[in-house]
Amino acid sequence: MSTTDRNDIRREVLRYLETREAPVTMSSIADELQNRPGLRSLRDSDLRAVVQPMIVTGTLSYAPGLKIKLGDTNR
């Protein structure tokens, strides 16, 4: 996966989560992104490879029930 692909996925994950009031599951994020033009071939492993570092850096955070929500986006 290229750096451009990772940046596109990152941007789309943030855009999706900004529209959600409640934390969502990883599968919800994957379903949403895989329906967007240009990301239809997105694999779950590619999504995880982008989301996991975002959790480690605090951009995203885990919520109860293994759900994901926005963390500190000012980093």
Image: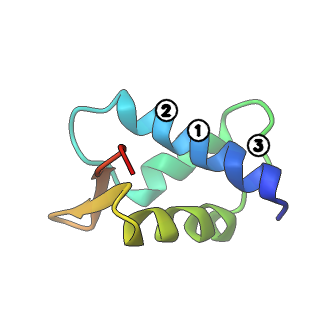
Mark drawn on residue 15: 2
Q: Of helix, strand and loop, which one carries label 1?
A: helix
Q: How is the image coloured?
A: rainbow
Is the residue marked by circle 1 packed among few (<14), some (14-19), or many (20+) residues within 10 Å? some
Mark drawn on residue 12: 1
The image quarter in which residue 17 lies: top left
Q: Whole-percent x and y of residue 51?
A: 51, 62
Which tag is nearer the camera, tag 1 or tag 3? 1
Q: CA distance from mark 2 to mark 1?
A: 5 Å
Residue at position x 71%, y 55% in the image: 6
The image quarter in which residue 65 lies: bottom left
Q: Are marks 2 and 1 in contact (CB under 8 Å)?
A: yes
- Image quadrant for the N terminus? bottom right
The image quarter in which residue 25 lies: bottom left
Q: Is residue 8 above or below residue 64?
A: above
Q: CA distance from mark 1 to mark 3?
A: 13 Å
* Residue at the extreme front of the image, as rendered: 75
13 on left or right of 2: left
Q: Earlier in the sequence, mark 2 or mark 3?
A: 2
Q: Of helix, strand and loop, which one carries label 2?
A: helix
Q: Amino acid at mark 2?
A: Arg
**Count of labels in the image:** 3
Mark drawn on residue 40: 3
Which tag is nearer the camera, tag 2 or tag 3? 2
Residue at position x 81%, y 50% in the image: 4
Q: Is residue 21 above or below residue 40?
A: above
Q: Amino acid at mark 1?
A: Glu
Q: Amino acid at mark 3?
A: Arg
22 on left or right of 48: left
42 on left or right of 48: right
